[in-house]
Image (tube, helix red, strand yellow):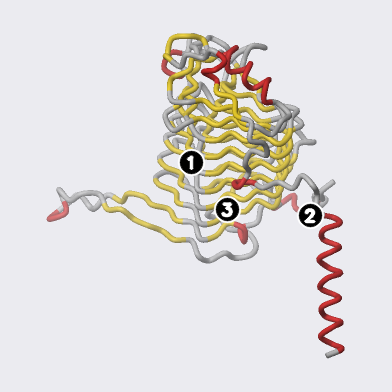
Amino acid sequence: MILHVKRCLTALATAFALLLVAPADAFEGCAAKPSSSLVVNVKDKGAKGDGHTNDTARIQNAINEVAGTGGTVFVPDGVYMVRATGKGRLRLRSKMTLKLSDHAVLKVIPNRARSYSVLRIGKVKDVNVIGGTLLGDRAKHEGKAGEWGMGIRIGPEVKRVAIVGVTAKEMWDDGFYVEGATDVALCSVVATHNRRQGLSIIEAKRLLVTNSVFQQTRGTRPSAGIDIEPDRPEQRVVNVLIERSKFINNAGGGIMIAAKRGYAANIEIVRNVFEEGRPILIENAPHVRSTAICNNRHIGQLAPPQEGLNAFAETIEVVSLQTDCRSGRDIRFEKNRGNTKKKKKKKPRTAN
């Protein structure tokens, strides 16, 4: 009896301690939702959604009204033409949700800019974007230079962002882009036929990608479904989970990790499906372990021998299941991890 009481007291003390250290603004990830009942419909602000009118200012007015309240900007069905360049582009504010209905489209007004974004999320916290489609100007882009036309650009100085059920397609460059953010969740998103990447992760701490699709990325290198690539020594990508997602027919492969210029660690890639092309490529990232890359499937096509009775046979679908999550190096995924001849001269890299 005394032992039982002691255990109960210990459990209570532990729970109380957890309550003391738990942040009041804990990140809810995919479950993020508005914290206020306030809803502002963009059509009440004059947005037309007719596929012709520039609705940027009217949508921004709704965003500004909801900013800081925890409420929602609602975008009903329609095609809303939006400016994606300069100071006039759409910028989300702290403590708000932007909710698009299933058939709502934010469509980029064609431009010749080297860099643009349909939605900019920078220097804010507690933002949700839910549903709808962001449609780029890839087919009608008026310039030929640049590779920074984004669907959603997240960062810098961003905390707690959830992107749920959003489709980003036909961007001049990336569907989604993260640089300088903490606690980001991309849940059930779709990136289709973007020119450079489905998703670029340049600098992030605690990022989740789950139940999402990255497909048909092609046009300019690297053309990956997801590219994790810190560009500068001070940039770090740590604590990333990519799970239960599909990577289909991306010209540069499913997931690429290149950390020659920056630092990448604690990246887990599990239970994903890769169709066609190279599934995973890791370059110069010694802190990314093969033990964290497990239970993925690769589906490819194998042509039968073109002779005899097989001369007219159809290609065969081959499914490879990865189950041997071994420690150490795995040559199926790793490349250019350093010159072994110089290994003794190098000092081990440590996190700052």
81 vs 6, nearest the viewer: 6
349 vs 346, nearest the viewer: 349
The mark lying in front, picked from 3 and 1, is 3
Label 3: which secondary element: strand
Query: Disc 1 designates what residue?
Result: 253
Q: Residue at point 86% right, 82% down?
A: 6
> Do we see residue 153 in this rendering?
yes
Q: Is residue 142 left or right of residue 126?
A: left
Q: Is residue 195 left or right of residue 308?
A: right
Q: Is residue 106 left or right of residue 163?
A: left
Q: Residue at point 67% right, 12% down?
A: 87
Identified by mark 2, the residue type is: Lys
Identified by mark 1, the residue type is: Gly
Query: Disc 3 designates what residue?
Result: 269
Disc 3 from disc 1: Cα separation:
14 Å
Quarter of the image that includes the N terminus: bottom right
Number of residue marks: 3
Identified by mark 3, the residue type is: Ile
Query: Disc 2 designates what residue?
Result: 344
Residue 185 image offset from top left, x and y in percent? 62, 43
Which residue is at the far left?
Answer: 309
From this view, report whether residue 23 is shown above or below residue 18: above
The mark lying in front, picked from 3 and 2, is 3
Residue 331 image offset from top left, x and y in percent? 56, 55
Q: Residue at point 68% right, 39% down?
A: 35
Label 1: which secondary element: loop
Disc 1 from disc 2: Cα separation:
33 Å
**In the image, which disc is placed on residue 230?**
none
Label 2: which secondary element: helix
Residue 200 image offset from top left, x and y in percent? 60, 34
The residue carrying pointer 2 sits among few (fewer than 14), some (14 to 19) or many (20 or more) residues within 10 Å by Cα, namely few
The residue carrying pointer 1 sits among few (fewer than 14), some (14 to 19) or many (20 or more) residues within 10 Å by Cα, namely many
